[in-house]
Amino acid sequence: MIIIGEKINATLDAVKTIILNRDTKSLLDLTQKQTAAGADYIDVNIGTGVGSQADEIRSIKWAIESIQGHVATPLCIDSADPKVIAAGLETLNGKPSMINSAKAEKHSLEAVVPLAAQHDSLLIALAMDEDGIANTVDGRLPSCEKICNACQKYGIPFENLYIDPLVMPISTDINSGLVTLETIFAIKKSFPGAKTVTGLSNVSYGLPQRRRLNIAFLHMCIFAGLDAAIVDPLDQELTAAIKTAEVLAGKDRYCRRYMRAYRT
Amino acid sequence: MNTSELLEKIAFNVIQGRVEAEDDGFDPGLEGRPAVTELVTEALNQNIDPKKILMESLTESMETVGEKFEKKEYLIPDMLASAECVGVAMDLLAPHLIKAGVESKGKFVIATVKGDLHDIGKNIVAIMLKGAGYQVIDLGTDVSVDRITTTVKEKQASFLGLSALLTTTMRVMGEVVQKLKEEGIRDRVKVLVGGAPTSIEFARKIGADAYCKDAFQALEIMKK
């Protein structure tokens, strides 16, 4: 399971301050902590919501220039704006990267998927289109198909594609968790080679004891075949849950990672 | 890579339990580096003496694995990973060993006795013996007394290893020894017994030649 560290996200007040103040030291610290905790990719979201597109482009360039050279862990450029993604990829200048994300909407796919092809980047794409997020598996699969078609059109191998089946709160629709799980199963079956990624924690929105729900849901997603998760790598209970679920689901040859975690 | 480097690398990867390059090992960060399959193939391409690979890379490293297991540094999956490495390496080496005229140290029939389906320990012993140069005939689990003694007779095996994990099935071992006597071949084969409920006293009582606490003790005893 690939862990994408979620902590550099400008929607969090502390991170927003770091970005607005161009606080290189704190940004680097936040990166290094996640790397040390075992993150495979570091998500970088600089969308503070207060500036223009030009401001965001300056911010992503600053963030990437601040981090690269100090940390070997590849970055995941997180923006809804293809121009910001493009600026980030150019700054990375060919280093391994991930894009977060495209939607299954026509204009999003046409703007973002070619970027992934051009920069040989891994691509996260969300199972939602012009009609929004469907609340059934059958409703989400056409979006997944649009994504896969776009990848084929622009020459991106399915191995580089991470489809986010999307997670909605069970507090508002009791079937939400099940729809995500079954969508993961369906993606694996319908688009062999394509991978899956998700953020998980939305599932517990509006309920008490969210951590318990998130961890139980993570276990189930891993059983369903989830390949990557956007999570806090510093949350040891969560990273332990990943190792526990993976060893039980037969994804950890000779229990290596599970036992190594126990030793250290 | 020169010969000694290559042999050392094979040994290292057996201890790490890495069959193929993509595998991770006991220690972190080894993914992607050549492992036992690639290295043994490379060694054979370089015409390194297969017997040397067997003795210096496989047998010795499994002894290290045994020590680590004794010290509880290694757990069951670690040992199985290393055992798989030896099994894979032996499959690669076997035709070359035969070509080089290396004789096996003898035929070793091994089985879990009738009524018992436990095979983890038995399988480890089988692979370890293979790695040590014996020709192993593994009859599997739940094997009848007749089938065991017939195989020993037909294959003219020098050694017989019997395994049982249940107090209710261990008595079958005694029946096997008895049957060997009746068939008049008891003197031609050394009988080793093992498994959780067995002991030195038990081995003595049923007239076996040796009791092995685990796979590594089995190898020690075989050396003698």
Image: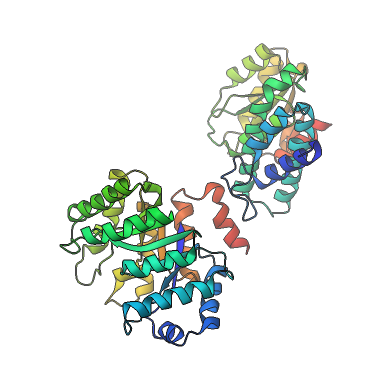
Is residue A109 something that shows in the picture?
yes
Q: Which residue is drawn at 38% across and 73% down?
A: A211
Q: Which residue is drawn at 21% across and 62% down?
A: A175
Q: On the image, which quarter does residue A45 sit in?
A: bottom left
Kindly give the residue lying farthest to the left in the view shown.
A131
Camera-side residue of A36 and B216? A36
Q: In this view, does A59 lie to the left or right of B54?
A: left
Give percent across and percent down for residue B195: 65, 38
Q: Is residue B211 left or right of residue A8?
A: right
Q: Residue at x 32, y 85 (%)?
A: A50
Colouring scheme, one of rainbow, by chain, secondary structure, one colour = rainbow
Is residue B197 something that shows in the picture?
no
Kindly give the residue lying farthest to the right in the view shown.
B224
Camera-side residue of A61 and A72? A61
Instruction: State whether residue A225 is above or below residue A242.
Output: above
Give percent across and percent down for residue A113: 32, 56
Q: Which residue is drawn at 29% across and 56% down?
A: A181
Give percent across and percent down for residue A63: 47, 75
